[in-house]
Amino acid sequence: MTINWIGGMLSILVLCLILLAGFMLQNSVHLLITGNIAQGVVVGMDTSSRFSDSSKDTPLKSPIVEFSISTGERIRVSGRSYSGSPSVRVGDLVTVAYSHSDPRIAQLLLWNDFPVVPVCFVLGFVVFILLIWISGILISGDSKMDDPFHLLPAVISHFRLNPIRFPALFILSIVIPLCGLGTYLTSMTAIDLRSNGIKTTGYVVRSKRVISSLSDGTKGSGVFPMINFNDTSGVQHTIRRSLAKPFSRLKPGDKVDVIYLARDPDKGVVNTWDEFWPPPLFFGFMMIGFLVIFFLVLNHSIS
């Protein structure tokens, strides 16, 4: 009898990774399903000894939330994740799930307080292994690479995968999540600036031609207005690559609206829509387009 060592080892690896993802979510999901729900308010920030990557002067913080349980006792808990820019501020309302037996065991119902990033990384690695595994079966045709339950051959047969169609699905399965991540990150950056940014007035001081090296080795250049503005402490900052009004005739002395975050004023931008929304729209449209192609390939509309 031939022992399917390769398929068996890969099956064990995939199973262990799935169990690891489940273990990482266990406590949060258990509290969400079986715990009591209460409305709390952010009363402060718990500070970590670590510092933000973007600024060595900004310690990582986690919200401290106070809520009342059924007995009337008020409980304070801090979030499970720390970041340089928490998604909530003092005074914000936050929903909390807490244990019946010990209310101090609680879960803030905030996306960044769940272990979403590590779980997505683990599950993404599982998907990557499965895609490589299927490609190995398609290319080699070796039965030793089959899984013990013969699930992968069933998937290959159901979707009529072959060495031509499968690479397209493989690439799309990577590109689509990356576009989704790009949409999320750029959208969060824009929303953070819009919600928490400090508005001020900037002045065009001059125009400067900026030359950059492109990925193919060629040189690209563009003329950008240099815009100076002062933050609330009076320190001057310069916006060097504004995309706002690229075809307008801005000249030295012109006033423009500027918005910046107190924690990172060097990344201030001109307060116009074309500084905020083109990147999220670009990644969003790309994701939608790739999704359409993905489903067309799955439905055999594209061979």
Image: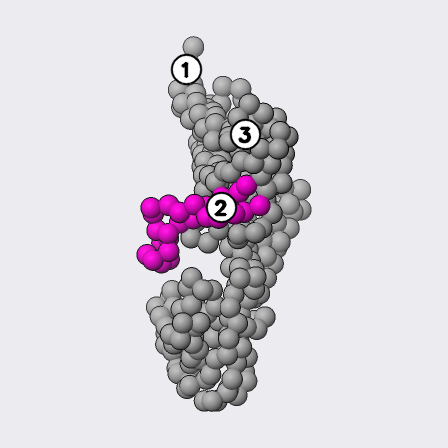
Type of amino acid under label 2:
Pro
| Residue pictured at 37% horizontal, 45% vertical | 48
Q: Secondary structure at mark 3?
A: loop
Q: Is residue 223 above or below residue 111?
A: below
Q: Position of residue 185 (x, y in %)?
A: 51, 55
Q: Secondary structure at mark 1?
A: loop
**Which numbered disc, 1 or 2, marks the residue that appears first in the sequence?**
1
Q: Secondary structure at mark 2?
A: strand
Q: Are marks 1 and 2 in contact (CB under 8 Å)?
A: no
Question: Label 2 crowding class (10 Å Cα cut-off): few <14, some 14-19, many 20+?
Answer: many
In the picture of the structure, the residue carrying the numbered disc 3 is 103
Type of amino acid under label 3:
Pro
Outermost residue toward the top in this view: 1
In the picture of the structure, the residue carrying the numbered disc 2 is 63
Is residue 119 in view?
yes
Is 64 colored magenta in this rendering? Answer: yes
Which one is in front, 62 or 16? Answer: 62
Outermost residue toward the front in this view: 72
Q: What is the chief secondary structure element of the magenta stretch?
A: strand
In the picture of the structure, the residue carrying the numbered disc 1 is 3
Part of the protein shown in magenta: 41-66
Q: How many marks?
A: 3
**Which numbered disc, 3 or 2, marks the residue that appears first in the sequence?**
2
Which one is in front, 48 or 283? Answer: 48
Q: Position of residue 92 (x, y in %)?
A: 58, 50
Q: Position of residue 84 (x, y in %)?
A: 42, 53
| Residue pictured at 45% horizontal, 42% vertical | 81
Mark 3 to mark 2 CA distance (whole Å): 17 Å
